[in-house]
Amino acid sequence: GDELVDLIRDETHTCYQGDRTHHHEWGCGCGQCPACELRAEGYRQFATLPATPLPTMEVSNG
């Protein structure tokens, strides 16, 4: 859910320049290196997806 997205965005880092000072909707980074461009594009694609609830599973005790 949102908590996992926040964790990934706020606690992971992929910028080739090591930039942690520029904050974007997709996370921290320079915004120009290939890693930042890829991460930004992936986040844009993810953000356009409709929220889909996880399927529920029946648990059998027998």
Image (tube, rainbow, N blue to C red):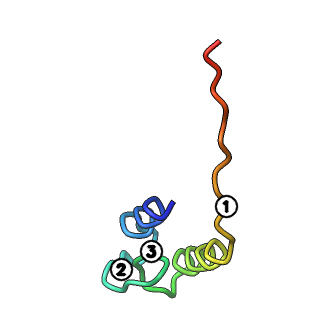
Q: Amino acid at mark 3?
A: Cys
Q: CA distance from mark 2 to mark 1?
A: 33 Å
- Whichever of callouts 1 and 3 sits on the residue coming sooner in the sequence is 3
Q: Which residue is mark 2?
A: 19
Image quadrant assignment for residue 15? bottom left
- Residue located 65% across and 21% down the image: 60
Q: Provide residue 48's location: percent of width, then percent of height.
A: 67, 77
- Residue located 38% across and 84% down the image: 23
Q: CA distance from mark 2 to mark 3?
A: 6 Å
Q: Would residue 26 appear left or right of 62 to someone viewing this image? A: left
Q: Is residue 36 above or below residue 4?
A: below
- Whichever of callouts 2 and 1 sits on the residue coming sooner in the sequence is 2
- Asked if disc 2 and disc 1 are in contact, CB closer than 8 Å, the reply is no
Q: Nearer the viewer, residue 26 or 14?
A: 26
Q: Amino acid at mark 2?
A: Asp
Q: Would residue 41 appear left or right of 26 to someone viewing this image? A: right
Q: Which residue is mark 3?
A: 15
In terms of secondary structure, where does tag 1 sit? loop
- Residue located 51% across and 59% down the image: 1
Q: Is residue 33 above or below residue 49?
A: below
Q: Provide residue 5's location: percent of width, then percent of height.
A: 48, 64
Q: CA distance from mark 1 to mark 3?
A: 29 Å
Tell me the tag on residue 1.
Answer: none
Q: Provide residue 17's location: percent of width, then percent of height.
A: 40, 78
Q: Which residue is mark 1?
A: 52
Q: Residue furthest left?
A: 21
Name the front one of labels 2 and 1. 1
Q: Is residue 35 above or below residue 33?
A: above
Q: Would residue 21 appear left or right of 44 to someone viewing this image? A: left
Q: Provide residue 38's location: percent of width, then percent of height.
A: 60, 75
Q: Amino acid at mark 1?
A: Thr
In terms of secondary structure, where does tag 3 sit? loop
